[in-house]
Amino acid sequence: MSTNRLYFIDAVRAFAILMMLQGHFIDTLLETSYRSDSYMAFKIWEYFRGITAPTFFTISGLIFSYLLIRAKQSGTIKKRIYKGLTRGVMLISVGYILRAPIFQWLTGEFSSYFLIIDVLQCIGLSLILVVCIYKITFHKTLFFSIVMLLLGITIFLTEPIYRHLELPEIPKVFSNYVSKSNGSVFTIIPWFGYVALGAFIATLFYRYVERPKFKIAIVSGFFIVGMALIFGSSELLMHLYFAFDISIFKEVAYYNYLFARLGNVFILFGLFYLAERYIKQPLILKIGQKTLSIYVIHFIIIYGSFTGFGLHQIIGRTLEPWQAIFGAIAFLSVVCFISFYYAKTNEFVYSNVQKIIAKFKDKT
């Protein structure tokens, strides 16, 4: 197996993180009166913003699983599993830290806001689950591939069952991972579905990337399946409902955002992989490799982590559209600059998590 890097993955990650930055900036600061479908620009922006999270979760599952599977061949599987588990714990920890209202705690004020689950905790737990499933499947790539495909589809098909799930009898620290009733932004279901399907795609790259016509086949597959999911998945689900009289198919078809967004992700993957040789630029790749630092810095600036004073509190929803657009461009530039030249979030947090785990091992 060649050790050539799949550069399009970093490009997709760069696209997703930049879309997230501008999405959070505009959503947080754009004046309320412009948030209407009567404004075509806002409607288009809102649609493309909805692709960001599915893209980020799917590409996370793809890259992590691809490296995990390759580690078996190189004989470093134990090291990769340990690194994956450590990174999962790190992301969960950072996710909680960013929402820690330190100054409120110092004044004796405590709230459940700290326990809200966001994208970092969700991805962190997803990585841990991928490792566990890979272990359960006995490191067999084919078995792992089938399990992840079926798991992803099942999570999407059963969405109506947990759509309005409430678990008042379970402590929020646990229930917030599966229920949005307490304010969680992301929950492990359905978002792990995208990670699982990304893992399935990783197995295709692992098995066939060396074959001469693989790129043509996978790009064609991304476009064909993507278009089918966007324009035909609801109709297919209705056919399944009429054929088997299972109401859940109809419920998913009437609120079919998961499969449709997956179609968007596949189209995006196809475009980026097709243009890989043109987007293999140092700046793009660097952005794709610094996603954690970029996320942490943007979160602090916009939402005022730790201090409670960010753009959200200082400016609020007051910007005109032109101000929001130019402000978003400046915001992206500043955050990336800080991440490139001043922030060492990945190295700092990762090294400290490793030290904590090492100390825990020593005590046990």
Image (cartoon, grey):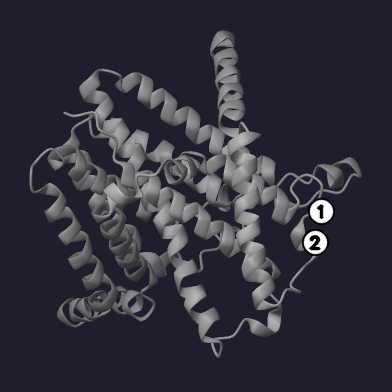
User: CB under 8 Å between callouts 2 and 1?
Assistant: yes
Per the model, the C-alpha gap separating discs 2 and 1 is 6 Å
Position in image of residue 99 (x %, y %): 70, 47
Tell which of 63 and 140 is nearer to you: 63
Secondary structure beneath dot 1 equals: loop
Check the image and report above or below for 39 versus 187: below
Identity of the residue drawn at 28% across and 37% down: 66
The picture quadrant where one finds residue 363 is: top right
Q: Which mark is residue 313?
A: 2
In the displayed structure image, the side of residue 306 where residue 17 appears, left or right: left
Check the image and report above or below for 304 versus 83: below
**Quadrant where the image shows the C terminus:** top right
Position in image of residue 265 (x %, y %): 34, 61
Q: Amino acid at mark 2?
A: Gln
Q: Which mark is residue 309?
A: 1
Identity of the residue drawn at 39% across and 77% down: 255
Secondary structure beneath dot 2 equals: helix
Q: Which mark is residue 258?
A: none
